[in-house]
Image: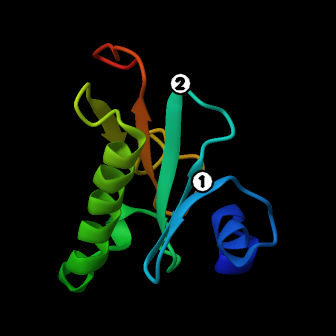
Amino acid sequence: MNQEDCIFCKIIKGEIPSNKIYENDLVYAFTDINPAAPQHFLVIPKVHKASLNEFDDNDRELLGEILLTAKKIASEKGFDQDGYRTIINTGKDGGQTVHHLHLHVLAGRALTWPPG
């Protein structure tokens, strides 16, 4: 899938509406349209990379920004102390359905393991 067909790239450009939570020069965060928990949002890089497999050592700052954004939002929403789960699905067997790296953040209830 190329950038022009990517739903997350279209969300970043404002071509598809989203419930934006946070945005800076590197990342965009928004609520998941099919939440799996009372709190469920995604943090995505603004640069199109299909999966974690496309990142390399030059992307350390961006990967750190994705994780630190999740932590920042969890703190602002007040569920950082009770806990939350972060997930990056990679590839078909990893459950990835949108081919633009995205970090799921789930919270607001006790989450079981394994997830299923």
Task: Inspect this view and state whether residue 46 appears.
Answer: yes
Disc 1, SS: loop
- The picture places residue 110, in percent across and down from the top left corner, at 34, 14
Q: Nearer the viewer, mark 2 or mark 1?
A: 2
- The picture places residue 2, in percent across and down from the top left corner, at 65, 76
The amino acid on which the numbered mark 2 sits, given as a three-letter code, is Pro
Q: Residues within 10 Å of mark 1 (few under 14, many from 20)?
A: some
Mark 1, residue position: 98
Q: Identify the residue at image location x=51%, y=36%.
A: 40
From this view, report whether residue 67 is shown above or below residue 27.
Answer: above
Disc 2, SS: loop
Mark 2, residue position: 38
Q: Is residue 29 left or right of residue 69?
A: right
Q: Identify the residue at image location x=61%, y=42%.
A: 32
Looking at the rendered image, the quarter that the N terminus falls into is bottom right
From this view, report whether residue 15 is shown above or below residue 34.
Answer: below
Q: Is residue 8 left or right of residue 99?
A: right
